Image (cartoon, rainbow, N blue to C red):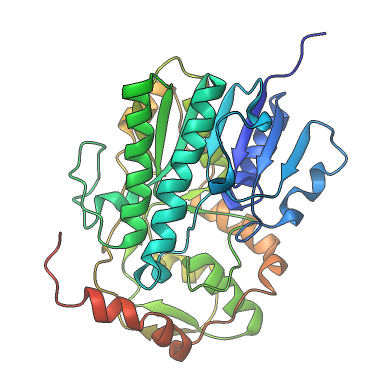
Amino acid sequence: MTAKPIAIVTGGAGFIGSHMVDLLVDRGYAVRVIDNLVGGREANLAHHRSNPDVSLRTADIREFQAGDTIFDDVSYVFHFAGIGDIVPSIERPLDYMSVNAQGTVHMLECARYAKVKKFVYAASSSCYGLAETPTAEEHPIRPQYPYALSKYQGEQAAFHWHNVYRLPVNSIRIFNAYGTRSRTSGAYGAVFGVFLRQKIAGKPFTVVGDGAQRRDFLYVTDVAQAFLGAAETPKTGEAWNVGAGNPASVNRLVELLGGPVVHIPKRPGEPDCTFANITKIIRDLGWTPEVSFEEGVSRVLAQIDYWREAPLWTPDSIAEATAGWFRNLSDRDPV
């Protein structure tokens, strides 16, 4: 009997990572998860608890050194681990650079030593900054805040390891992923988590600006499919955008969720629209998004209780959490 191929998913107890684990198991892989459970939740892997092909190592990615046995016989590494909340990066840039950039280097060294077949890096479309739309991979890089910089430097490190050490690397620049199991951490973060907790509490949705801003929302299972394609392709040294290629407004999200609204000030340095040009990934990998925005929101609402213990954000608490953002990014020319 042929042994199952082995994949590592860093951040595999988190939002996208746990869905990546699900897809890999469905495709016949054995999966080793690395997660420090700061942003991830062991409950996201509970349905794999009795599966001997899925294991969890609770550890910080910065603790790993080349030669760690968890990388033995591994074919693919999917690197999602990192700090994902954007707003706190203004106040904690050292943490973000340490985890998202230096932590990635630790994973790259482990992968290089183990001679893995492919290392797939979870990059962020925030590297493009205030971009022209639709945004292609060749767009100038203009990170506007430390989170964006740290994720881009992690990507640069990955391609450096590809160029210098011949480590097979591909990168996926994720636009606005959403879906079940998204973060419920204490930091003020992604719009879905904020709105879902507000809906549970019967409070108004805190809409930034007039709500006309559009985001290229892509359902999480479509994201996972893109990552698997980036691993299994013979192509290497490539970066691909991943989005729906069909942005939806925050007002449309509110319409689908249903509920009252209160408006809060628009934040500087944030784009009016994110819009992925996905021509390259469609051409190279044959990948296309499958879950419509309406269907995705319906799936999330069906599991809304997941966000019951998440922080309940109000206009006042958001103003406090984003004070540093306004102080540092207001009245600045784009970088």
Furthest-right residue in view?
50
Residue 265 place in picture, x, y as percent: 31, 83
The residue nearer to you, when weighing 39 against 25, is 39
Query: What x and y, as percent, mark residue 31?
Result: 70, 32
Between 153 and 22, the one lying in front of the other is 153
For residue 87, side relative to residue 223 (left or right): left
Instruction: Give me the residue at 51% from left, 41% from top.
Output: 223
Along the line of sight, which residue is nearer the eye, 49 or 112?
112
The residue at 48%/73% (across/down) is 188
Q: Is residue 41 left or right of residue 118?
A: right
Give the quarter of the figure containing the N terminus: top right
* 22 to the left or right of 95: right
Q: Is residue 198 left or right of residue 43?
A: left
The residue positioned 53% from the left and 19% from the top of the image is: 115
Q: Where does the C terminus fall, quadrant-wise?
A: bottom left
Q: Is residue 185 shown above or below 81?
A: below
For the question of whether residue 52 can be seen, the reply is yes
| Residue 53 placement: quadrant | top right
Q: In percent of the image, x 31 and y 54: which residue is there?
A: 149
- Image coordinates of residue 12 in percent, x first then y, are 63, 45
Residue 200 point in image, percent of width and height: 65, 78
Q: Could you say which is closer to the camera, residue 192 or residue 97? A: 97
* Residue 140 in the image: above or below residue 322: above
